[in-house]
Amino acid sequence: MTEGSPIPLPLAWSDKAKRTKDSPISFLIAEAMRNPSLVNFAAGLVDPWSLPVEECLEITRRILSDVDRGRRALQYDTTLGLNDLRRQCLKHLASLEETPVEKLGYGPDEIVVTTGSQQALYLIGDILVNPGDIVIAANPSYFVYTGTLQSLGAHVMAVPMDQHGMDVDAVAKLLEKLDRSGEISRLKLIYCTSFYQNPTGLTLSADRRPRLLELVKKYSRTHRILLMEDAAYRELRYDGPVERSIKSYDTTNQFVASSYTFSKPFAPGIKLGYTVMPKDLAHAVIAQKGNHDFGSSSLNMHIAAEALADGSYLKHAEVLRGVYRRKRDLVLAALKKYFGRGGDGAGSPSDDLPDAEHPIHWTHTHGGLYVWLTLPPSIDTSRTGPLFGAAVDAGVIYVPGEYAFQPDEDGHVPQNHLRICYGSVHPDQIEPGIAKFSAVVKKLLAKTPRPVAQATGL
Amino acid sequence: MTEGSPIPLPLAWSDKAKRTKDSPISFLIAEAMRNPSLVNFAAGLVDPWSLPVEECLEITRRILSDVDRGRRALQYDTTLGLNDLRRQCLKHLASLEETPVEKLGYGPDEIVVTTGSQQALYLIGDILVNPGDIVIAANPSYFVYTGTLQSLGAHVMAVPMDQHGMDVDAVAKLLEKLDRSGEISRLKLIYCTSFYQNPTGLTLSADRRPRLLELVKKYSRTHRILLMEDAAYRELRYDGPVERSIKSYDTTNQFVASSYTFSKPFAPGIKLGYTVMPKDLAHAVIAQKGNHDFGSSSLNMHIAAEALADGSYLKHAEVLRGVYRRKRDLVLAALKKYFGRGGDGAGSPSDDLPDAEHPIHWTHTHGGLYVWLTLPPSIDTSRTGPLFGAAVDAGVIYVPGEYAFQPDEDGHVPQNHLRICYGSVHPDQIEPGIAKFSAVVKKLLAKTPRPVAQATGL
Ligand SMILES: Cc1ncc(COP(=O)(O)O)c(C=O)c1O
Ligand SMILES: Cc1ncc(COP(=O)(O)O)c(C=O)c1O
């Protein structure tokens, strides 16, 4: 190759790199940057106005005006994570579980601190999944993680969801089928976001929690199957029942890893998460993290530990519950106003919609940052479909539901869903945003030939 | 498996996990924690007394007392990294290269911000290396990265070093051999720490820099071979020639990725690095990082950007050069006093050593945090050898050199070297530490049967 040649020789990518897709949301980010006046129901950002700026100013002042502490915060720490932070997390988990620390079944050394909970999800996937291995997840699921699993070469097998979260009967059936075919030997992981799931906002119901764990135990015959509980949104609860974690049923700390984050209940800018996991898994995660970065930012770990210790974390999570509860209410009220009478999870079409036979659903959520909207099957919500472009032209952007699904046996992915994230949308923009969006939907429905009625699941 | 069974069923690890070894230094950390009075020449920590605590207090105060800026610092940022930081890094690189920004041959979008430079090294390895692929590195090398490469399944082929750094003639020979055998199709990466290498402290000489790049170009016939230049210690220069980066010869930004860090010249607690790389590689790194954490800590990126912008980064790097220059001088002086007359890279044995025929070498370094000490072949420096335990008993700990080597064709790893890191050792402890250590060595030499003279390379 001659120097300065305009077309460079290709690099020889690894199989892993070849399997790694660009994030589906990078184009959404680009779209929103091009057009900052969009009502951005797509961005997975948190509420900017309530970020704990003052608290962090005070906390960093406290840490950095004490020279010894400041030095520790600016030095490398361990790969496992700041000792004090892991102890604070343990106490915090005990209070979430309403259990004394001694009864949790794990200690601070089974808590690994990571660069956001995403890193924990990644590391655990990497440690367990060989190309061709199986992971079970819900349809729909948090697409960044299903994408990660696919880049690791996993075959992600999806089970449906309903209002009560992941369909555990469907999990049982799938496990039985995998067991009969022998493929169970390749099943490494079941992934479940147990609280206010991304993208649906739905929570796994109380009775399904121990059942899911029992299934994992039952089918852990030749090897242990890991239940990966993603609890990122646990603390953003606005109403509805208080659930225990799935982890709380795993009294011997063997089958469940549960990941938490500071991003959602505190601030993403410190990019920290923590995951409680079985001891042998923690050992392997730390070995792996030793290669990734050999430890997350000490400064951020000191900030997180101090926020937990001085009560500002808890206070702030309470503030956020207020902020997001209000926004969730505004979203549900606007959906009701513009799309129907319902808003109870079953939904119902608005009287003035031209296609009254095709129900419009949305999830009635009790926490988190998302509402999941199901449009009539005639409406294609996908990025290249007519709705998306028309919505952007009208000033609204959303995440097409297609990204969150694994295709069924025929390669089919539902294309009539979308995710509404109210994380970073200003309260005053919510109703106008839904209003504009509904106008676009109605216009499209008016144009769409009335399709054959078709059941639309979640 | 019964609940509560004492011996848990094993998890079914991925091949990757099976290849991932525990960090060789975790036992060193444990040893040092058990015994905090040790003079710790092992820890790869930075000088604690000079950490920029006041600067960071002032910078975080500035960021977080401006509400808008504070909010941006506590929100998610992009996967690529804070725009402002990447622009500041670009300017900084231009000043390091003594070149106008426009002549660098790359722009801010070819700079990727990572969680320490370690993450960049990891991601680039992961993107290029399939199990069985070849990476060329120096013997010895930064063992965290060679370990990472091995966990990715790489066959790390090592070439020797001399006082002028990686032996580029040996690289040429190896490339020719790989080319003849056809194995060159599996060569993905050449890894070279071009400034004040970890573990030797040695720098690649001026004439070898463009030659290494020319070799990479010459053998990039069917695919592009990447030259991974690790410039972590570039700014910790105390004396000796000022070298250009290897990257500066890669005028079309195609063959070289160069990684930098804030850990060494500023503070590891913000755990940030940045790497300039070819555009197609940046694209793949970002896709991969999207799965790892989808972006490093915003708060830390704002701190780093501000430190570059307000001059405190440059000022602090200058302070550190003073601090470490003094410590490096103390190490070299103590080695001279207790081990010999030399200290010029060729070294020479101390008059009072019993085994005068076996030279003791140490590297005369011009920067970085390390001096590399070569003992007579009769002295086994390995973790399980007699020196290590005796040194710990005498109050001194070091990193056995064996970790930094790839075995030769016979599986042999030299076991008479060790790394002295003066990063976190107090200046007052340096001479006493070397004194104690030399006493242990001398005692061992006195006991050791005089072995057949043997050439000891670096
Ligand atoms: C379900 C779920 N898990 C994990 C994460 C990771 O977030 P972080 O890495 O900031 O903790 C997200 C982020 O949106 C999420 O939605
Ligand atoms: C040669 C070299 N490269 C990279 C790193 C990674 O450091 P960091 O991730 O803190 O930038 C180190 C750390 O010691 C190193 O010695």
Image (cartoon, coloured by chain):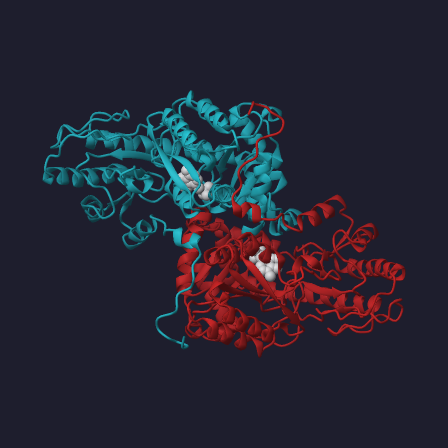
Chain colours: A cyan, B red
Q: On the rendered structure, is A94 left or right of B281?
A: right
What percent of the width, then of the height, locates residue A266? 47, 39
B175 or B102, nearer to the observer: B175
Residue B81 visible? The answer is: no
On the image, the x and y values in percent for residue A83 come to: 63, 40
Establish if B86 lies above or below A351.
below
Where, quadrant-wise, is the N terminus of chain A in this rendering? bottom left
Residue at image coords 39%, 39%: A156
Residue B99 is left or right of residue B345, and the answer is left
| Residue B449: quadrant of the picture | bottom right
**Residue at the spot x=36%, y=25% of the render?**
A164
Report the image quarter containing ligand 1. top left
Looking at the image, residue A95 lies above or below residue A420 = above
Viewer-proximal residue among A21 and A199? A21
- In the image, B104 versus B56, the foreground residue is B104
Where's residue B205, x and y in %? 61, 76
Q: Quadrant of residue A165?
A: top left
Q: Where does residue B319 sit, x and y in percent of width and height?
A: 64, 64
**Residue B53 shows in the view:** yes
User: Farthest residue in the bottom direction?
Assistant: B207
**The furthest residue to the top:** A207
Question: How many badges with numbers are in the image?
Answer: 0
Q: Is residue A234 above or below residue A288?
A: above
Quarter the C terminus of chain A occupies:
top left
